[in-house]
Image: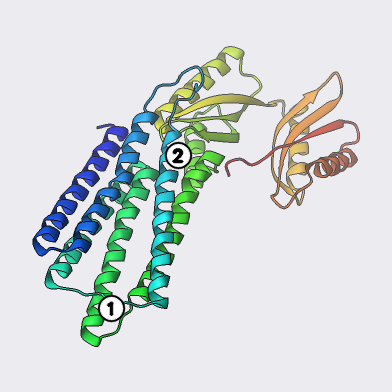
Amino acid sequence: MDRNKQIIRTSYIGIAANVLLASFKAAVGLVAGSVAILMDAVNNLTDMLSAVITIVGTRLSERPADHEHPFGHGRIEYFTAIIIAVIVLMAGVGSLIESVRKIIEPTMPQYSTVTLTVIIVAIAVKLVLGRYVKEKGEQLKSDALIASGADALFDAVVTLGTLISAAIMLIWDVNLDGIFGTLISLVILKAGYEMLASPINELLGSRVSPDFVARLKQEVMSFKEVHGVFDIIINSYGPDTMIGSLHVNVDDTMTARDIHRLTRAIASRIYEQFHVILTVGIYAINTDVQGLGKLQHDVMDYAAHHADVHQVHAFFYYEDRNLITIDIVPEESVKDGQAFAATMESDLLSRFPDYHFSIIVDHNYSE
């Protein structure tokens, strides 16, 4: 079963569980003549909203690429997760307001055997459902499912707080409803904020994980012709669609045909292993160890030992202009790229006075 089908199936399970729980509460409420239990049953029906939103978002994200959206519609999943996170935040705010009101104007809730039975069943169902949905979300890398599962778990926590408060009141005649509710509401608000941050960061273009970059570099370096991997840029267009680029160092003796074969092989391997649509650029290593190769080594080594330099690559010598260009990735502490480039050019000129230098300040997008 593919990823989207698993997400939709999990969401349907969530809907079915909420319908069964709502039906149970409605039946108990009718038999016991409890309006509160009937209202709680209605609340369970509204809890299905996150599952419905997840299904709709997943269906929309499946739409193929078109002229206006050449990379597909996968990012709709991030909007789905944002909507669910906002629902959680709204629930947290509503719960906080109600809890603070109970602290200011405390009321003594009435609990019966029927009410406590409903509470215990609700906790059990929501805990099982929330854990299942959240684990599936983590397995499928679905922010929407993770948020939906967390929503169910928070319902269980809120209900558990009600049960603990009821037990304390029945045993010691102390009403802690408002205090428990306030603490739980703050936890929900914190979690809702964290749920909101993940999809927003994806839409803004967050840095890919170091583990992913390390595995990708290792795969590219497995090609015997590759001597280094640089400038890795990965953009996410949904959990199943990543597009990126990188450069590799190869010997300057390779022909255009050799390079064509190599870059095609790298792109195919990376798509198979990581599902990344990759563009591969080339940097040449000068193999003449006595002439240009020695110059490349000396310049690169000198620049790499500068205090503010993180990485050096892309050496190229223009014979007709006696010009050397190199790309330098400065340390994150460097804020003024133009001043940094001027300093580096001056330092290199003082060390290699027979050449002109042009420094391209590069950026670390992935490491």
**172 up-or-down from 118: above or below:** below
Q: Position of residue 315 (x, y in %)?
A: 73, 31
Q: Nearer the viewer, residue 337 or 353?
A: 337
Q: Position of residue 37 (x, y in %)?
A: 19, 61
Q: Residue furthest left?
A: 31
Q: Position of residue 229 (x, y in %)?
A: 58, 34
Q: Residue furthest top?
A: 257
- Residue drawn at (39%, 30%), measured in percent from left and top? 61
- Residue drawn at (88%, 31%), measured in percent from left and top? 355
Marks 1/2: CA–CA distance? 41 Å
**Three-letter amino acid code at disc 1?**
Met
Residue named by callout 1 = 108
Q: Report if residue 107 is visible in the image.
A: yes
**205 up-or-down from 223: above or below:** below
The image quarter in which residue 156 lies: bottom left
Left or right of 136? Residue 341 is right
**Three-letter amino acid code at disc 2?**
Phe
- Residue drawn at (44%, 52%), measured in percent from left and top? 195
The image quarter in which residue 252 lies: top right
Q: Nearer the viewer, residue 259 or 309?
A: 309
Left or right of 312? Residue 367 is left
Left or right of 353? Residue 131 is left
- As helix, strand or loop, the secondary structure at mark 2 comes to helix
Q: Are marks 1 and 2 in contact (CB under 8 Å)?
A: no
**115 up-or-down from 228: above or below:** below
Residue named by callout 2 = 79
